[in-house]
Image (cartoon, rainbow, N blue to C red):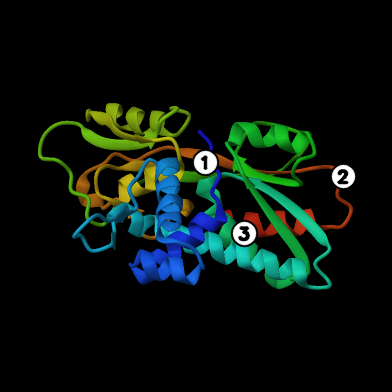
């Protein structure tokens, strides 16, 4: 299930995280407290997670899920502000549309865009997140100019393909249960990397169980950060607050996957090639 975030709701959540007071946030937005509550409830419903603890006689506080989500909200709002500023400059006339996955956008893509922006600050970047199996079609349809995702096989649009190790991702607070299978968290629809985790555990004579699910990668990250389970991610995509699982947990090694960049054939400006070059650099092992 795709979740479309409303920037107004994200700004309200960020303000509430700063103020921890619904009345103060309502005053800042020149509205009523009930409107702030409604925006927060809508955001929580879309995520399927409670972000703020509140109620009669209770202090307003972020939940553990809210603390994790706040990290990504601040990133999204920062990128939104940068995009708005770029649109207001006289030179921001060229647009480069990048399609990628949520996981890559929060890690490798962020690093690559930082380098790209320093080289070409006059280019406006538009990011569209989707599943890897959908991005190639969107590229062929002309909806995006560059796609960066899990490799979809040989194609005339493919610019590069790199192999990247998969690793176990965890919270620093995760503790392996004394008995029973290894707890895992993945996407609800099952189109993810769980087969790599279960195959590696089976080969090592260990058992794994998908104990927790979320329809969105942000939800999976929340489950991992809470210390409830482990998941599997490409090595360069693990960013704080997640960490590679400690070797002392005795987890088996995982195989690798291929990440690839694809570009539409209609570009004659060189902007696509420059962005792909930065994606390639950010994808290489450090």
Sequence order check: which comes first, mark 1 or mark 3? 1
Q: CA distance from mark 3 to mark 2?
A: 23 Å
Depth order, front residue of 266/152:
266
Of residue 200 and residue 274, the one placed in the foreground of this image is 274
Q: Secondary structure at mark 2?
A: loop
User: Can you tell which of label 1 and label 3 is closer to the viewer?
Assistant: 1
Q: Residue at x 42, y 37 (%)?
A: 255
The image quarter containing residue 253 is top left
Near-viewer residue (100 or 119): 100
Image: 72 above or below 144: below
Q: Are marks 1 and 3 in contact (CB under 8 Å)?
A: no
Q: Residue at x 45, y 70 (%)?
A: 27
Where residue 55 appears, as percent x and y from the top left, is 24, 54
Which disc, if any, is residue 3?
1
Residue 186, given in percent of the width and then of the height, sits at 38, 36
**Residue at 76%, 46% in the rendered image:** 145
- Residue 166 in view, yes or no: no
Which mark lies nearer to you, 1 or 2?
1
Image: 146 above or below 114: above
Label 3: which secondary element:
helix
Count of numbered tags:
3
**Can residue 35 be spotted in the picture?**
yes
**Dot 1 or dot 2, earlier in sequence:** 1
Query: Relative to the observer, which residue lies in front, 73 or 254?
Result: 73
Outermost residue toward the left in this view: 178
Crowding at dot 3, Cα within 10 Å, few <14 / some 14-19 / many 20+, comes out as some
Q: Residue 159's image quarter? A: top right
Q: Secondary structure at mark 1?
A: loop
Q: Which residue is mark 2?
A: 266
- Name the spot of residue 111 as percent of width and height, x first: 57, 62
């Amino acid at each position: 299930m795709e979740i479309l975030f409303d920037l107004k709701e994200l700004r309200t959540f960020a303000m509430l995280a700063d103020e921890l007071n619904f009345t103060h946030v309502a005053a800042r937005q020149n509205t009523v407290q009930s409107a702030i509550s409604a925006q927060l409830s809508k955001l929580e419903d879309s995520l399927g997670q409670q972000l703020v603890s509140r109620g009669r006689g209770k202090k307003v506080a972020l939940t553990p899920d809210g603390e994790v989500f706040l990290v990504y909200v601040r990133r999204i709002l920062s990128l939104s502000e940068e995009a708005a500023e770029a649109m207001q400059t006289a030179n921001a006339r060229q647009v480069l549309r990048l399609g990628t996955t949520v996981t890559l956008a929060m890690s490798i893509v962020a690093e690559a865009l930082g380098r790209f922006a320093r080289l070409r600050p006059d280019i406006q970047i538009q990011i569209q997140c989707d599943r890897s199996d959908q991005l190639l079609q969107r590229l062929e349809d002309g909806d995006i100019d560059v796609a960066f995702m899990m490799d979809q096989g040989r194609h005339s649009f493919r610019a590069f393909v790199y192999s990247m190790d998969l690793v176990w991702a965890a919270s620093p607070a995760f503790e392996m249960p004394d008995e029973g299978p290894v707890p895992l968290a993945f996407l609800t629809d099952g189109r993810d990397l769980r087969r790599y985790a279960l195959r590696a555990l089976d080969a090592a004579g260990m058992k794994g169980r998908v104990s927790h699910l979320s329809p969105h990668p942000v939800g999976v990250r929340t489950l991992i950060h809470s210390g409830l389970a482990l998941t599997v991610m490409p090595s360069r995509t693990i960013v704080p607050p997640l960490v590679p699982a400690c070797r002392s947990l005795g987890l088996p090694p995982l195989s690798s996957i291929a990440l690839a960049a694809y570009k539409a054939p209609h570009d004659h400006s060189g902007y696509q090639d420059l962005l792909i070059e930065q994606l390639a650099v950010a994808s290489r092992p450090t």
